Image (cartoon, rainbow, N blue to C red):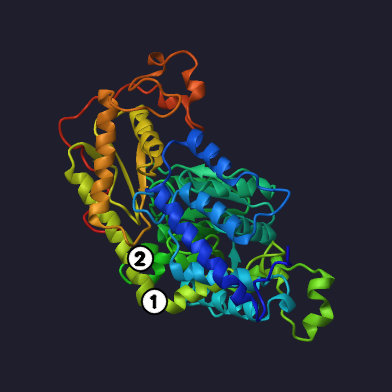
């Protein structure tokens, strides 16, 4: 076999072009085979089918580049949960823009490593300019804001706690019960005290409870607020939280991984009022920024706040090289080798501009409000609340939690829809996280019809249930012995022990904060 060609260099593009054509054909063929937002049949069907299609992964003799690409990419696409499908709306899992994916190809082909200037001369300059520009969007009134690229919100939140620890020692973190799980995990990883969890009974951090916690605690404090919660997409009262932090001498980190891009929308940026008062901010553009993962950032109001990240490795940032003018990149991340994720972000921002990005954001949020309108008008469905960003919670009217969970799994099993799950107000809800700006009103109506029809099928017993579930609806008493052990991964028995809810004749009273306009 001849030596395989490389992706870079003058001959790289010629080698890539036919391979890319094979990949694009395989992506098309796989999506056609799938025929929906995800493959039908669940893991018991998808896993063996994928393994059969891709076996053996390490043959004695290679099959050649085109065969391998066609085989594995087709199998991956056929078995994908495709966020570009309007009914794939479970998570903060965005459909990436084509131009961003194309830029990512260039990053892969050139393969700069962002840990020393001599591995990434132009990429390091581009990253420095991009991070400064994005930090200035968050902190427009400080002289030298800065940001570092991260793998996403989890890494950015960990960095925020690390920087606070380096400033003040073992800080006590305070966050709402609505905060992302990465906050607690970061405290554990960094050897910090377990975060104090403040109630968030309406989905946002309770200010009175936060004031009480800040009054009672005496060690250095770091409050973590959330701008775009994972479950409901709600935004904590940022300005009021910043006021309390100022009163009590606490620092503030805002996890705006989901909601941060609202800054680019003149229509919706007021939802983030007070964001610039934080000591650090998490931003994640592989959510409401339509980037391929990963594309996270941690922003700070002053560049020197990042100084604790500095690290010295003589082969990468020797003192005399730095003194001679070679940029020191090791202080830009806790990682060593890392990809030039700035490229795809920069391409997107330059191609779309502020107005183009604002249009995508506004269109996506309008779609979420339209879905909420459709749910409100449907007598068989309940709406939790008007969406703050683009997350809509709904459930079949009169259903118990077991019913809601089974509807979700049945839609997955059939390959009809990918919906998330969230607990709010003591009940389980179906979660639609809308991030696809191409979703149409008809797509939304079809999704609601799927939910209603699936619910009706389950109640009348006219459908096959997901693997391991042999009765519907009811409690564990209605299930054969041992059934709960066969439920899909992640199912908890509390979903099977809820008493059936009493059906209501009319649509329930809206959530107290419901309004006809975005908050």
For residue 425, side relative to residue 339 (left or right): left
Identify the residue at horizontal 34%, vertical 62% (top origin). Answer: 437
Q: Tell which of 386 and 460 is nearer to you.
A: 460
Q: Relative to residue 436, is residue 81 depicted above or below? A: above
Residue occupied by mark 2: 361
Residue 394 visible in the current orientation: yes
Residue 250 visible in the current orientation: no
- Give the quadrant of residue 209: top left
Q: Tell which of 470 and 509 is nearer to you.
A: 470
Marks 2 and 1, Cα distance to the nearest angstrom?
Answer: 11 Å
Q: Tell which of 199 and 291 is nearer to you.
A: 291
Circle 2 crowding by C-alpha within 10 Å: few under 14, some 14–19, many from 20: many
Residue 7 rendering spot, x and y as whole percentages:
64, 71
Residue 426 rendering spot, x and y as whole percentages:
37, 33
Residue occupied by mark 1: 354
Q: Tell which of 307 and 361 is nearer to you.
A: 361
- Quarter holding the C terminus is bottom left
Is label 1 in a helix, a strand or a loop? helix
- Give the quadrant of residue 359: bottom left
């Amino acid at each position: 076999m001849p030596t395989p060609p490389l992706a870079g260099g003058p001959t790289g593009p010629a080698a890539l072009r036919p391979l890319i054509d094979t990949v694009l054909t395989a992506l098309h063929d796989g999506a056609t085979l799938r025929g929906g937002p995800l493959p039908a049949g669940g893991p018991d069907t998808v896993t063996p089918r994928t393994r059969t299609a891709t076996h053996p992964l390490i043959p004695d003799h290679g099959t050649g580049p085109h065969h391998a690409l066609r085989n594995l990419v087709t199998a991956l696409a056929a078995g994908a949960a495709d966020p570009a499908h309007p009914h794939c709306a479970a998570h903060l899992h965005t459909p990436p823009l084509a131009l961003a994916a194309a830029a990512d190809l260039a990053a892969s082909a050139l393969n700069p490593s962002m840990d020393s200037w001599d591995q990434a001369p132009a990429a390091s300059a581009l990253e420095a300019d991009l991070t400064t520009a994005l930090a200035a969007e968050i902190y427009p009134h400080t002289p030298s804001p800065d940001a570092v690229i991260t793998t996403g919100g989890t890494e950015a939140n960990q960095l925020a706690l690390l920087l606070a620890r380096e400033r003040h020692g073992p800080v006590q973190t305070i966050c709402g019960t609505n905060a992302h799980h990465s906050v607690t995990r970061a405290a554990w990883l960094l050897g910090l005290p377990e975060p104090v969890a403040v109630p968030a009974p309406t989905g946002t951090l309770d200010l009175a409870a936060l004031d009480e916690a800040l009054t009672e605690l005496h060690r250095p404090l770091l409050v973590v607020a959330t701008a775009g919660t994972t479950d409901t997409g709600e935004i904590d009262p940022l300005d009021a939280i910043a006021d309390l932090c100022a009163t009590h001498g606490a620092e503030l980190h805002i996890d705006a991984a989901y909601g941060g891009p609202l800054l680019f929308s003149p229509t919706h940026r007021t939802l983030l009022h007070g964001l610039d008062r934080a000591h650090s901010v998490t931003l994640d553009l592989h959510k409401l920024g339509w980037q391929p993962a990963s594309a996270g950032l941690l922003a700070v109001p002053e560049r020197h706040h990042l100084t604790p990240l500095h690290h010295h490795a003589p082969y990468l940032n020797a003192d005399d090289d730095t003194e001679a003018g070679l940029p020191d990149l090791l202080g830009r991340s806790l990682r060593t080798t890392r990809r030039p994720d700035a490229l795809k972000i920069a391409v997107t921002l330059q191609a779309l501009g502020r107005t183009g990005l604002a249009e995508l954001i506004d269109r996506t949020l309008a779609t979420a409000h339209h879905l909420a309108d459709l749910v409100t008008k449907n007598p068989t469905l309940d709406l939790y609340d008007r969406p703050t960003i683009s997350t809509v919670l709904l459930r079949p009217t009169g259903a118990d939690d077991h019913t809601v969970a089974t509807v979700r799994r049945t839609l997955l099993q059939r390959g009809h829809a990918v919906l998330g799950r969230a607990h709010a107000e003591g009940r389980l809800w179906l979660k639609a996280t809308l991030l696809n700006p191409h979703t149409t009103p008809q797509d939304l109506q079809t999704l609601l019809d799927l939910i209603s029809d699936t619910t009706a099928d389950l109640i009348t017993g006219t459908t096959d249930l997901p693997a391991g579930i042999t009765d519907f609806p009811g409690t564990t008493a209605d299930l054969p012995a041992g059934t709960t052990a066969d439920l899909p991964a992640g199912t908890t028995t509390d979903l099977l022990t809820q008493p059936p809810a009493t059906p209501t004749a009319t649509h329930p009273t809206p959530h107290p904060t419901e309004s006809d306009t975005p908050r």
